[in-house]
Every structure is written in structure tokens, then in C-alpha cells.
Amino acid sequence: MTDTQENRAARYPLLSQPHVVLHGPVDHDMYASFRRQLADAPADGPLVIAISTLGGDPEVARLMGDELRLLRDYTGRETLFLGKVAVYSAGATFMASFPVDKRFLTRGTRIMVHERIITKTVDIAGPLKSVVAGLKANLHEIEESVRIEEEGFRDLVAGSKIAFEEVQKRAPSNWYIEAEEARDLGLVLDLI
């Protein structure tokens, strides 16, 4: 039997009607929509969450992912990820909260992975010891952000054929991954 669009659709019928549909910037408005849709979703059975985004706040993406992790851990409920068209930046962070065998993409979708970005101006003024403390605080913020980023990269590739070091190497220049490549690398289970 050949792997046609029809038999893929038959294998994954739940993906045709996601329970939670997220689109646009990953921000607090998306989180509020996520919570509303989650509350309105059926209480039992697998839960399908679809997203299409050019990115946004990675901490909001982590928060939504953590909500779903808690749901899985405390209820045993299956959660399925469906990426549509663009799963960029914070969208990939959100995708990382799902095991690879629960991730799907629509044909033609692109994933984009990059390093976290910071824009900050540091003003140095005042007593020397307080200036040193302020500089150290800024450095600690950056170091902690790097650790969080690396945790996310590890979660993204866990269970796939992609080594963590490969993500580290490619993320600084915005790594775009086409749907077919994502499937072939084991980053997602399948395409629909």
C-alpha cells in the first residue's frame, strides 16, 4: 500500500479538527485564547493543539507547554501537536514540549529555530561596587537565558535523529527546516 494523502488522513482523523487552534504572535493574548480553548475542549480523549506562528515570547510558549505537560502527567491524557504553515521561533519552543511521536506538520510547513535574542542597553553610573553588581546581574540574566535556551533545544531534538550540537551549530543563523526534512530527521512523526 502506498503512503497517499488519503491513507494518512485515515490514520490520523483527529488531526482534521483540532481542539485548540493558535495563530499569530506567541504572547499573552495567545495564552488567554489557549486557556479558553483548553477549558472548552472535550474532557476526555486525545487533545489536538494546532499552531501557526512567526514567533513571539518564548516564556509564553514554555508556559503553554508546561500546562500541557501537567495535563499529561496528572491525567494521562494524550496531547498531539499540529504545526501549520509556519512554526517559527517561540512556535518551535512550544513544539518542544510535545514528544516527537506526538508531533505532526501539514505539508509545506516550515520550522524555524534560532537563538534567543536580547536587546539591552547597560548604563554605567554610580558607585563602583553597585556598578559591578549591576553588570553581574545583567551577565547572570544572559547566562540563565542561555541555559533555558539549551534546555529547549534538548527538548526539541529528544527522540529525533538530530544531535543537540547540530542545533547549537545551526540556530545562530536561523535554521529553517522543511516539513519533509523534519519528518526524515525524526523531529515530527508524520505529515498530513
Image (cartoon, rainbow, N blue to C red):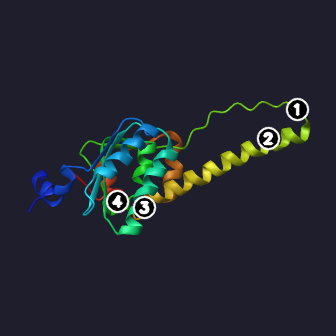
The answer to which of marks 2 and 4 sits earlier in the sequence is 2
Q: Dot 4 corresponds to which residue?
A: 186
**Where is residue 128 shown, x and y percent of the image?**
90, 38
- Amino acid carrying mark 1 in the image: Gly
Q: Are marks 4 and 1 in contact (CB under 8 Å)?
A: no
- Measure the C-alpha gap from mark 2 to mark 4: 43 Å
Residue type, numbered disc 4: Gly
Mark closer to the chain start, 4 or 1: 1
Tell me the kind of residue under disc 2: Gly
Residue 176, quarter of picture: top left
Across and down, in percent, residue 125 comes to: 85, 30
Q: The disc labelled 3 sits on which kind of residue? A: Arg
Q: If you read the primary sequence from the N terminus, does the residue marked by circle 4 or circle 3 appear first? A: 3
Given this view, does label 2 or label 4 mark the residue nearer the observer? 2
Q: CA distance from mark 3 to mark 2?
A: 36 Å
Q: Residue at x 37, y 38 (%)?
A: 53
- Eyeballing the image, is 29 above or below 41? above
Residue 160: in sight, yes or no? Answer: no
Find disc 1 in the rendering and name its residue: 126
Instruction: Between residue 40 and residue 146, name the one nearer to us.
Output: 40
129 displayed left or right of 123? right
